[in-house]
Image (spheres, helix red, strand yellow):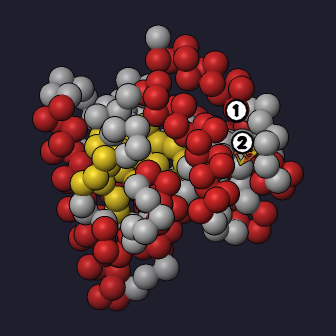
């Protein structure tokens, strides 16, 4: 049922031209994963690699996310990943709060209403502002549980793109923070959906799944 509803929403999403971000993108990039997943990871928006492949979080940030998920025994095919913004902003500009709000209310809220996740993980500041509020800060509020406006339990952690910009001691500290945040999310989702299998035997090869769109 969720699968059919999401497929219908994906058809509508692909026709969206409601804002200027669509002009510089190949096409809107929706979500990837299992519609029955009790956990959803929400990033910021597609970059160049995501736009090319039509898959969220498949580029360098996504590869780092996959490693982090593997470290807490989750794989991309068993969870669901998506973004607040669906079209790649021109020059990979970071969307402002109004831009993120506009797209997020049109599409992400509808996705979440269908999926009804037990736990959401907000990756980075844009997702935190949309799912929490504009006053929240990723450096201050990551690792803290809050309710989204739709009533879902949400925890924020650093976006993997942020980790890719760090080095040395800062990188080690931030990686541990992310690990602990993901562990907290895993603990909560297992308590809420103890029978759901969060991982396959091997990490998901997204590039082979999405190579057709890239060609
Ligand atoms: S960014 Fe969102 S609102 Fe704008 S055109 Fe793409 S899907 Fe539509």
Q: Quadrant of residue 99?
A: bottom right
Whereabouts is ligand 1, in terms of quadrant? top right
Q: Quadrant of residue 39?
A: top left
- The x and y percentages for residue 110 are 54, 31
* Residue at disc 2, secondary structure: loop
Q: Nearer the viewer, residue 158 or 101?
A: 101
Q: Residue at x 28, y 43 (%)?
A: 153
Badge 1: residue crowd in 10 Å (few <14, some 14–19, many ≥20): some
Tell me the tag on residue 28.
Answer: 2
Q: Residue at x 31, y 66 (%)?
A: 142
Using the image as rendered, state which of residue 196 and residue 141 is in the foreground: 141
Q: Helix, strand or loop at disc 1? A: helix
**Which residue is tagged 1?**
13
- As measured in the structure, the alpha-carbon distance from the residue carrying label 2 to the one carrying label 1 is 7 Å
Q: Is residue 144 left or right of residue 133?
A: left
Q: Does label 1 point to a residue whose CB lies under 8 Å from ligand 1?
A: yes
* Badge 2 vs badge 1, beta-carbon distance below 8 Å: yes
Asked whether residue 128 appears in the rendered view, the answer is yes
Lateral position of residue 104 relative to residue 153, left or right: right
């Amino acid at each position: 049922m969720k699968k059919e509803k999401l497929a219908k929403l994906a058809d509508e999403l692909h026709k969206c031209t409601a804002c200027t971000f669509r002009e510089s993108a190949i096409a809107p990039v929706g979500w990837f994963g299992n519609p029955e997943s009790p956990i959803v990871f929400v990033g910021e928006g597609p970059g160049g690699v995501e736009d090319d492949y039509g898959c969220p979080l498949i580029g360098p940030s996504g590869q780092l996310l996959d490693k982090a998920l593997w470290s807490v025994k989750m794989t991309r095919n068993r969870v669901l990943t998506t973004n607040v913004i669906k079209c790649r902003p021109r020059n990979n500009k970071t969307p402002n709060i109004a831009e993120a709000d506009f797209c997020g209310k049109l599409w992400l809220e509808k996705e979440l209403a269908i999926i009804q996740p037990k736990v959401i993980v907000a990756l980075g500041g844009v997702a935190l502002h949309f799912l929490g509020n504009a006053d929240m800060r990723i450096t201050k509020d990551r690792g803290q549980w809050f309710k989204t406006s739709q009533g879902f339990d949400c925890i924020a952690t650093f976006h993997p793109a942020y980790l890719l910009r760090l080095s040395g001691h800062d990188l080690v500290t931030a990686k541990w923070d992310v690990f602990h945040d993901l562990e907290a999310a895993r603990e909560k989702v297992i308590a809420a959906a103890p029978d759901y299998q969060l991982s396959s035997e091997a990490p998901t090869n997204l590039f082979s799944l999405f190579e057709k769109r890239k060609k």
